[in-house]
Image (cartoon, rainbow, N blue to C red):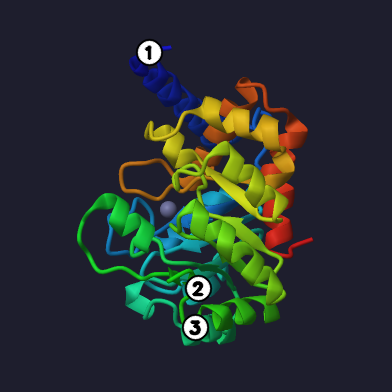
């Protein structure tokens, strides 16, 4: 299929998903795509310093209306445990979680930022992302010359990182690899496990340029790998590559998320529905979808 028809197909999928989850229920039709029990682990919301399509409140209302079970609010620059707690007061049937990304705005690899994430009222802080847009791998690959936050220096974890891993483990948080390189992730996963952490997520593993062999190693080391819809939606990754990885390594080692929230994109529930439709059309079965969109995210967030 050429690029133009692939884009057209994705547009049709998103329209179909929006129709199925937003319009048909108004006429009391059974929805063809069932989003109950689904958790979106990667939702960007406003207010933010980047343009966002929906704020925290709009996002959780849309997610609840679509039947989602849970959503993780992610911001690259500020903690979201507090925002998740506020947003959760607006909904009755949705679990809203937040976290902190250890970029420069919170002091980089800063154990105190993680301690405060845990202590905040409502206790919705569940995910700690290693540096994302400020990661050494991301900044170096982009060649922007911006300052960055390293996770490994001279072959060893940077000061504070093992303490961060230990706070994560003590509080049963999720350690997400952010925009670390696959090599860094492979070195850090066992170190996080040594501290007692067992909820480890490799953030959009394809976006980090991991090879199939590295993904197999991440799976063997006990990490869950994230596959996001945004990368496919914006033609950065092909859906076929996701399908090959799921088939070769096993759905048990992946979770699927939207990574939506950009001002130009639809809401997260629409993204999740389009993603699921696309995967099923490509041959991924219902049990594999359940594992990646329901069970693995719930296991990481200790919802079951
Ligand atoms: Zn993102």
Q: Secondary structure beneath disc 2? A: strand
Badge 1 vs badge 3, beta-carbon distance below 8 Å: no
Q: Nearer the viewer, mark 3 or mark 2?
A: 2
The residue that disc 3 covers is: 160
Q: Return the residue nearer the eye: 234 or 148.
A: 148
Above or below, 287 relative to 2: below
Which quadrant of the view contains residue 2?
top left
Q: Residue at x 65, y 41 (%)?
A: 35
Which of the labelled discs sits on residue 156, or is there none? 2
Q: What is the distance, in whole Å, between disc 1 and disc 2 at their CAs?
A: 45 Å
Instruction: Tell how many labels.
Output: 3
Which tag, 1 or 2, sits closer to the chain's start? 1
Which residue does the numbered mark 1 point to in the structure image? Answer: 2
| 166 to 276, vertically: above or below | below
Query: Which label sits in the foreground, 1 or 3?
Result: 3
10 Å crowding of disc 1: few (<14), some (14-19), many (20+): few
């Amino acid at each position: 299929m050429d690029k133009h028809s692939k884009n057209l197909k994705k547009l049709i999928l998103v329209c179909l998903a929006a129709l199925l989850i937003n319009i048909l229920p108004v006429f009391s039709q059974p929805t063809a795509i069932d989003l109950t029990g689904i958790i979106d682990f990667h939702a960007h919301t406003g207010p933010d310093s980047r343009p966002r399509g929906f704020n925290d409140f709009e996002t959780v209302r849309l997610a609840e209306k679509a039947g989602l079970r849970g959503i993780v609010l992610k911001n690259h620059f500020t903690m979201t445990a507090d925002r998740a707690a506020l947003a959760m007061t607006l909904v009755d049937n949705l679990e809203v979680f937040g976290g902190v990304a250890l970029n420069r705005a919170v002091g980089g690899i800063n154990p105190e930022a993680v301690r405060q994430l845990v202590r905040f009222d409502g206790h919705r802080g569940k995910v700690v992302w290693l540096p994302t847009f400020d990661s050494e791998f991301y900044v170096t690959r982009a060649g922007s010359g911006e300052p960055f936050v390293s996770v490994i220096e001279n072959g060893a974890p940077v000061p504070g990182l093992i303490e961060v891993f230990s706070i994560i483990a003590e509080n049963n948080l999720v350690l997400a690899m952010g925009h670390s390189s696959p090599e860094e992730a492979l070195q850090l996963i066992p170190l996080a496990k040594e501290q007692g952490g067992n909820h480890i997520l490799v953030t959009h593993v394809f976006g980090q340029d991991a090879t199939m062999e590295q993904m197999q190693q991440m799976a063997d080391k006990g990490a869950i790998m994230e596959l996001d819809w945004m990368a496919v939606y914006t033609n950065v990754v092909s859906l076929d590559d996701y399908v090959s990885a799921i088939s070769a390594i096993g759905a048990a080692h992946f979770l699927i998320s939207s990574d939506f929230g950009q001002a130009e994109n639809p809401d997260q529930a629409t993204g999740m529905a389009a993603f699921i439709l696309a995967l099923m059309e490509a041959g991924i079965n219902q049990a594999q979808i359940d594992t990646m969109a329901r069970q693995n995210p719930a296991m990481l967030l200790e919802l079951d």
